[in-house]
Amino acid sequence: MNYTLVMLKNEVRVEFNMETGNSDFNTAVYEELFTRKQSIESDFGDQLVWYSLPGRKACRLKYRK
């Protein structure tokens, strides 16, 4: 699992990738975080983009500005 900071000409974004090689574990982590979505976004101070990415090994949270 890792954080990625992407800086482009027209946007900056941060991503939290749940990608351990075990898709069941990644999905379980994502689902647990998603149950706390309101609290997480409240603490963060803005809405995040939630990607469960069905059929893939990874799940992702993203914020872009």
Image (cartoon, rainbow, N blue to C red):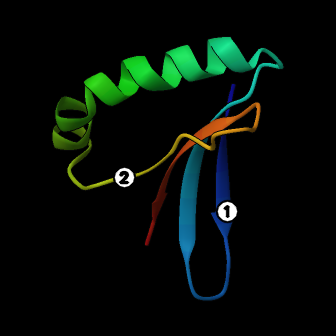
Q: Quadrant of the N terminus?
A: top right
| Residue under numbered circle 2 | 48
User: Counting other residues with Cα less than 10 Å from the Cα at mark 2, is it few (<14), some (14-19), or many (20 or more)?
Assistant: some
Where disc 2 sits, the SS reads: loop
User: Counting other residues with Cα less than 10 Å from the Cα at mark 1, is it few (<14), some (14-19), or many (20 or more)?
Assistant: few
Where disc 1 sits, the SS reads: strand
Q: Are the residues at dot 2 and dot 1 in contact (C-beta closer than 8 Å)?
A: no
Q: Position of residue 53 (x, y in %)?
A: 63, 44
Q: Position of residue 58 (x, y in %)?
A: 71, 34
User: Disc 2 to disc 1, how far (Cα)?
Assistant: 15 Å
Q: Name the kind of residue labelled 1 in the image.
A: Val
> Which residue lies at the image location 35% right of the left edge and 30% below the top edge?
34
> Which residue lies at the image location 76% right of the left edge and 31% below the top edge?
57
Q: Quadrant of the C terminus?
A: bottom left
- The dot on residue 6 is 1
> Which residue lies at the image location 62% right of the left edge and 36% below the top edge?
59
> Which residue lies at the image location 52% right of the left edge and 17% below the top edge?
29
Q: Name the kind of residue labelled 2 in the image.
A: Leu
